[in-house]
Amino acid sequence: MAIKIARLELANIRAVHAFAKAYGIDCESNPCGTTDVVYDAKQWEMAQEAVKALQAAMPGDDASVYAFHSSEEVRERFYCGKGGDEGVCGGVSYEAGSINAYKFTIGVLMLCLEKGLNLQTNTPVTSVSRLSEGGYQVGTPRGTIRARRVVMATNGYTAHLLKRFQGVIVPLRGHVTAQRPGLNVPKDGLPGTYSFFYEKGFDYMIPRPKGCEFQGDVVIGGRLSSAVSEGLYEYGSTDDTAEDEDTMRDLHNTLPWYFGDNWGDDHSEGRVRHKWTGIMGYSPDGLPFVGEMPGGKDLWVSASFQGHGMAFCWMSARALVEMMEGRDDEELRRWFPGVFRIAEPRFDVKFDGRMPHTHGESPAIKQ
Ligand SMILES: Cc1cc2nc3c(=O)[nH]c(=O)nc-3n(C[C@H](O)[C@H](O)[C@H](O)COP(=O)(O)OP(=O)(O)OC[C@H]3O[C@@H](n4cnc5c(N)ncnc54)[C@H](O)[C@@H]3O)c2cc1C
């Protein structure tokens, strides 16, 4: 199953960039390498173990092409500085990419509109009820519609309409900033995207690619552990109009810590250009829910992508359509991980605290 997930992630990244290119969607698509820079000895040990297991399980596969870097190499090739007491333990790089998700989504919606999609913006669905004759009635503040089939792509908000997902897909608020690069950051920009792993969690970062507005700006998010009780209360939050001040403060300060002398003095207009929050959907087993609702014929779901949907949504949607069109066959089972499918027993596992793999060691699952 792990092999299928690793292959799906890479296939998804490639498919999104290929689609953007094929349809000329202007979305800052940048297929590039990424580097995980590790600042904690235990995490570094775990990273090496995980990558070695992956490579042993799928030798020669594109999805297992990972390269290790010593701390010196991380400093020289990726410009990372000392960073805390322990400094850089090492790094590992592999194929990834960055994209402007908003522009990509708008591009896809434009193509759908050309094909006759009826798009109603600012129109929340307030109810989905099954009709006795089959199909569904979908309620909104601007009226109701009837639908033969319904697809819920509502991610962190799914439980509001489908109560069975209460405690099963839980919203989590994430924080992001866009920062002007420090004066010592290479003028040609940083080589690829990065994630930074420290004792209590991780931050993830993309430099805005060449040729786009604000090129070279560093977009960095994370710092969940900075919020109250190491981010525990960010779970359950659906308010993306507000922010946690401690998280934003630490995101503001984190880049000089990671890049050390290679960051240098701040840009004369200040470090942070923009900051925002957004809502993700987390499940206790850390996996998406894709498929038809048990006992809910013609009610389909593709949701719960954790903080990693850019690498899974696209192919999950493709798998969902295969299922909806009656092609749930051997071929689909070959590439789509069975653990991503909606299955009755997954509703019995309820969320009870933070995810173990978001940071820390706290147990999250209550049976
Ligand atoms: C701050 C932040 C940073 C992230 N960074 C990364 C990253 O670096 N890499 C990565 O892979 N992923 C990242 N993610 C996660 C990624 O954005 C998500 O996994 C992905 O957007 C999920 O896509 P989706 O379409 O399933 O759900 P969403 O993008 O959450 O979209 C769900 C949509 O449903 C709508 N909706 C919900 N309920 C209703 C309703 N009742 N009526 C009408 N509409 C409704 C919402 O308004 C929303 O537009 C990040 C997320 C956040 C918040």
Image: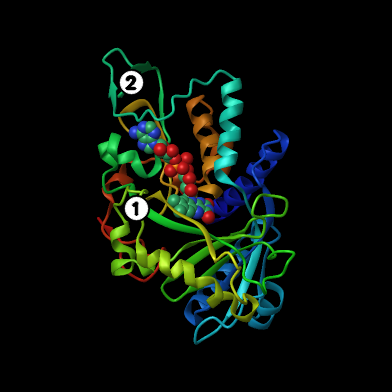
Q: Residues within 10 Å of mark 2 (few under 14, many from 20)?
A: few
Residue kind at label 2, given as amino acid type: Arg
Q: Is residue 334 visible?
A: no
User: Image quadrant of residue 3?
Assistant: bottom right
Residue kind at label 1, given as amino acid type: Ala
Percent position of residue 178, x then y:
54, 58
Disc number placed over residue 142 in the picture, else none:
2
Q: Which residue is mark 1?
A: 242
The residue at the far right in this view is 188
Local SS, label 1: loop
The residue at the far top in this view is 133
Local SS, label 2: loop
Percent position of residue 169, x then y:
33, 47
User: Which residue is drawn at the image coordinates 34% and 49% (left, top)?
Assistant: 171
Q: CA distance from mark 2 to mark 1?
A: 27 Å
User: Which residue is drawn at the image coordinates 28% and 38% (left, top)?
Assistant: 160
* Ligand 1 sits in quadrant: top left
Q: Answer yes or no: disc 1 within 8 Å of ligand 1.
A: no
